[in-house]
Image (spheres, helix red, strand yellow):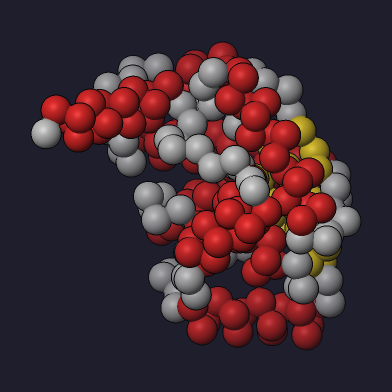
Amino acid sequence: MNKSGKQILAMLEDRYQKYGKQKLLLHVCCGPCSSGVLGQLQQYFDVTLYYYNPNIFPSSEYDKRKEELPKVIKGLHLDFPIVVEPYQANEFYSKIKGHELDPEGGERCHICYQLRMEKTAQYAKQHGYDIFTTTLSISPYKNSQVLNEIGYALGQQYGIEYLYSDFKKNNGYLKSCQISRELGIYRQDYCGCVYSLQERKRQIDEVDRK
């Protein structure tokens, strides 16, 4: 399932030549990641950004990341719509119950991917999109193979095509960092949930003690 950067670009070009600009629902997690992904997709798809991230803690952080999305759209001179779901943290906590102590990148994170991508697939199917995907794979800390396995399974379950993604390829992550700096986009230093925030604080404390 793993594809090289060249294979991914060829796949996008082939789709565009065959179908033209299809309607893509793009699950977005934050402004910086969105900036890098939109830079790769804008010439191939009519994109709608879908902001659904009940894992984010606290609610003020959810709002802060949400508010950066219009800045990304404006900064990239795009005219893509943004759909924002209300903050429902209980949806995240109910799903990961029993996995609170899992390590970062473990089963708790996979459940979180599933939660957010399933909501995206459902919305895409209900609102007439051709295809869906997520920005999550642009992060070097996210397992793209797991994300794509979840995406393909959800596509089959809900009858909507999933777009293979590994947006970190072709220097995607580095480009997202550069674009977000140029646009002055807020860049968070933890994934989003309270557990990743606690882990980040532990890492900082360890550095301070050295």
Where is residue 58 shown, x and y percent of the image?
54, 18
Work out whether residue 112 or residue 125 is closer to the camera in this orientation and state it.
112
Asked whether residue 160 appears in the rendered view, the answer is no
Q: Look at 39% across and 56% down and name the residue there.
A: 140
Where is residue 155 shown, x and y percent of the image?
63, 53
Work out whether residue 37 or residue 112 is closer to the camera in this orientation and state it.
37
Q: Look at 76% across and 56% down and name the residue there.
A: 75
Residue furthest left as drawn: 210
Asked if residue 109 lies left or right of residue 106, the reply is right
Q: In the rendered view, would you say 52 is above or below 45?
A: above
Q: Look at 38% across and 30% down and name the residue there.
A: 196
Work out whether residue 179 or residue 63 is closer to the camera in this orientation and state it.
179
Work out whether residue 126 or residue 48 is closer to the camera in this orientation and state it.
48
Where is residue 11 shown, x and y percent of the image?
61, 79
Query: Residue 182 is drawn in which quadrant?
Result: bottom right
Asked if residue 139 lies left or right of residue 35, the reply is left
Asked if residue 92 lies left or right of residue 48, the reply is left
- The C terminus lies in quadrant: top left
Where is residue 170 shown, x and y percent of the image?
50, 75
- The N terminus lies in quadrant: bottom left
Q: Look at 48% across and 17% down and name the residue there.
A: 93
Say how many tags the image has. 0
Query: Residue 132 is drawn in which quadrant?
Result: bottom right
Q: In the rendered view, would you say 90 is above or below 133?
A: above
Asked whether residue 111 appears in the rendered view, the answer is yes
